[in-house]
Image (tube, grey):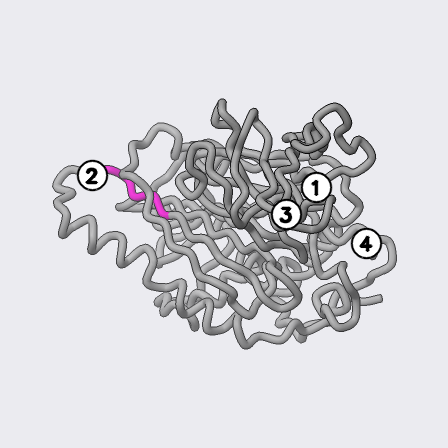
Amino acid sequence: MTQSSVLNPDRLRPHWLPTGWFQVGWSTDFPAEGVRPLRYLGGEQVAYRDTSGTLHILDAHCRHLGGHLGYGGHVQDDCVVCPFHGWHWSPEGRNTHIPYQPDRPNRARRLRVWPVREQSGMVYMWHDVDGREPDWEPPDIFTDTASHTAALQYHAPSQVKFDALTLHPQLVSENAADPIHFRYVHGARSHPVFLRRWQDEAHWFSQIGFGSRWRPMEPDSHDGDTLSILVAGVGLNYTSLSGSMNTLILLSTTPIEAGTSDMFQTVWLEKLPGDTPDVLESRLDQAISQLPNDIAIWSHQRFEDPPALATVEGQAFTDFRRWARAFYPEVADEFRL
């Protein structure tokens, strides 16, 4: 079985869904004791905050008669209550109360509980085809992307969501292995080069140099125009743009169903002297202006397997695709590049 099968939902269902953390919104999307429907990763979910403010995500449909908890449901006693017959479902997915049978909740039926993390204003949900618990955590964009970023001060983030794009998250993440596209898609003056690359089981990192004075960088240096990209799973892309103006960007791509994904873009601009509203607007426009060019490519791109690679780009692409196959656990042992 080839990797193209993994990304082709008509060939392999439901395993077009990779394992990993995926963004499902920002913290501000989930108000205190609020209930919100979600539709991601081939299913429907309900997200709600309990009375302490902790966010929970469960499968959306009540196991009684299938009422959708996200439409008309409410929070009571830290449970989400079905609008259809008032059944209470706990953060652990258990039925704790039936109002017209208060002494006998249904202990046999359970709702799937989706692991959740909130970090730096983002909400992540864990997916695994086999229901396994997370074995790694989402990176912290301020400390894990580049060594110098934690010491900087940033303006409040800009947040943009792109709904139901026709693309798969792996196509987005492969940009980390493709510095040459910056010349043709984004108008870089010459071909950028890799300064550094590494990977582990959950992460792929590349540092890309731009301009005419490329040099390998010291671990704590942030001089020069460089792009540091940390990919976590195949759905999260953390980027640090270093140079005269430091910028952090999180680009998250979350599958909805076969062939469509939502994309979340969060941008932090470094606080600089002279940052008037007009200057900030110009800096933000510069930071986000190139993403539509990428989306135009990804939305019409076919996944080539094997690709016809030039010699200078072959190693990075081959390494990336071998690394990415681990996030499709049902086929990881079978597929070959």
Residue under the image location 16 percent in, 43 percent down: 275
Q: Which of 25 and 80 is in front in this view?
A: 80
Q: In this view, does 305 lie above or below 147?
A: below
Q: Main secondary structure of the magenta part?
A: strand
Q: Name the residue under label 2.
A: 272
Q: Position of residue 48 (x, y in %)?
A: 53, 37
Q: Where is residue 267 in the image (x, y as percent from the top left)?
A: 36, 47
For the C terminus, the image quarter is: bottom right
SS at badge 3: loop
Measure the C-alpha gap from mark 4 to mark 3.
30 Å
SS at badge 2: loop
Which circle marks residue 60 in the picture? 3
The range drawn in magenta is 267-271
Instruction: First in sequence, mark 1 or 2: give its number.
Output: 1
Q: In this view, does 111 lie above or below 213?
A: above
Q: What residue type is labelled 2?
A: Leu
Q: What residue type is labelled 4?
A: Ala
Figure quadrant of residue 162 = bottom left
Instruction: First in sequence, mark 4 or 2: give its number.
Output: 2
Residue under the image location 64 percent in, 61 percent down: 317
Q: Name the residue under label 1.
A: 201
Circle 4 or circle 2, nearest the eye: 4
Disc tally is 4
Which circle marks residue 332 in the picture? 4
Q: For label 4, count other residues whose C-alpha is less than 10 Å away and answer few (under 14), some (14-19) or many (20+).
A: some
Instruction: First in sequence, mark 4 or 3: give its number.
Output: 3
Circle 2 or circle 3, nearest the eye: 3
Q: Nearer the viewer, residue 136 or 97?
A: 97
Instruction: First in sequence, mark 1 or 4: give its number.
Output: 1
Residue under the image location 47 percent in, 62 percent down: 163
Measure the C-alpha gap from mark 1 to mark 2.
37 Å
**Decide: marks 1, 3 in contact (CB < 8 A)?**
no
